Image: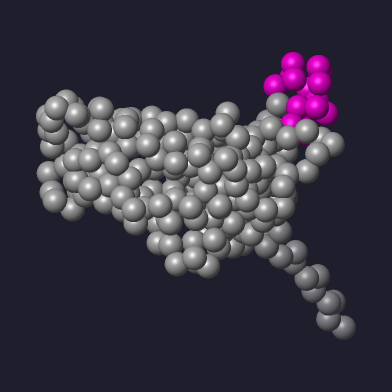
Amino acid sequence: MATPRRRESSGGDEGGGANWMDTYGDLVTLLLCFFVLLFSFSSVDAKKWEALVGAFSGTTAIAIPSLSPEQVIEKPIELIARTSGDLIMKDEEESNPQGDGETEGNYDYMNEDAYLNLLKLEENINDFFDQNGLAFDVIPDRDTFTITVRIGSNVFFNSGEAELLPDALPVLDKLTELLAANDSRYVLLTIEGHTDNVPINTSRYPTNWELSALRAVNTLRYVLDKDVIQPGKLSAMGYGEHHPVETNETTEGRASNRRVDFVIQGVTEFDTDTQTGSG
């Protein structure tokens, strides 16, 4: 009987003991990539990171800066709360640019009452103008909490003169009524006179300084004589030709520079036990 032949071992296992090195090499490579990724996160530019996250998610990311060891040891909770609070307010401002009664623009979030007061004052002015058919520029300044009502000087004065025109009086009556109704929403009304750069050089007004200053004072005196606004809230300034809003090189630009500005300084400090007026 034929003796069965023993199957010879396959030579495929030769060198197979080194297969574990492939797995080990993969593991080391993954660990290296992991730590490189961690390092890149530790030094990522915050603005670029926010832009990257926003591009994928459609929302604004809030990046909280890292704290130093000294900060963590001393007052970590207060620092984290203050830092994240600032960033959250910044994020709310960016996500709500239209100012729907919450936040808008760059303002001190500790001054929210002043900001909301400014919004209400601006709303009251615009509504009043619409109801009374007045078309003047209303320019709010969120940083200084002021609103400027800009009126061309031709509405109040003849060219080169500082005496109020009869047709200006009904307009000033309306403005005074508006300001009296919102008395609790502002602390100062400054009436500013401005001219273009064309020399005046008359016996009554040697320079544009005198002309602009007298226009402002005469306007103020009319408002003051109505006796509905506290005198301490009124002031007058003459700026001559030195605060133009347009170029003086064109006829249109010079016409824009000849103006009377009513600069209304909103209330910025509130007593905790009082409310601002509802007007």
Q: Quadrant of residue 183?
A: top right
The colour style of the image is: one colour
Q: Which residues are magenta?
A: 68-82
Q: Nearer the viewer, residue 61 or 124?
A: 124
Could you tell me residue 45's position as x and y percent? 53, 38
Say whether residue 238 is left or right of residue 241: right
Q: Residue placed farthest to the right in the image?
A: 1
Type of secondary structure dominating the magenta stretch: helix
Across and down, in percent, residue 7 comes to: 78, 71
Closer to us: 5 or 257: 257
Q: Position of residue 223 (x, y in %)?
A: 48, 42
Residue sitting at 43 percent across and 62 percent down? Answer: 134
In the image, residue 255 lies in the stretch drawn in magenta: no
Q: Nearer the viewer, residue 96 or 123?
A: 123
User: Which residue is depicted at the point 81% across and 70% down?
Assistant: 6
In this view, 16 is above or below 247: below
Tell me which residue sits at (42%, 55%) in the image: 171
Q: Can residue 145 be seen at all in this image of the molecule?
A: no
| Quadrant for the N terminus in the image | bottom right
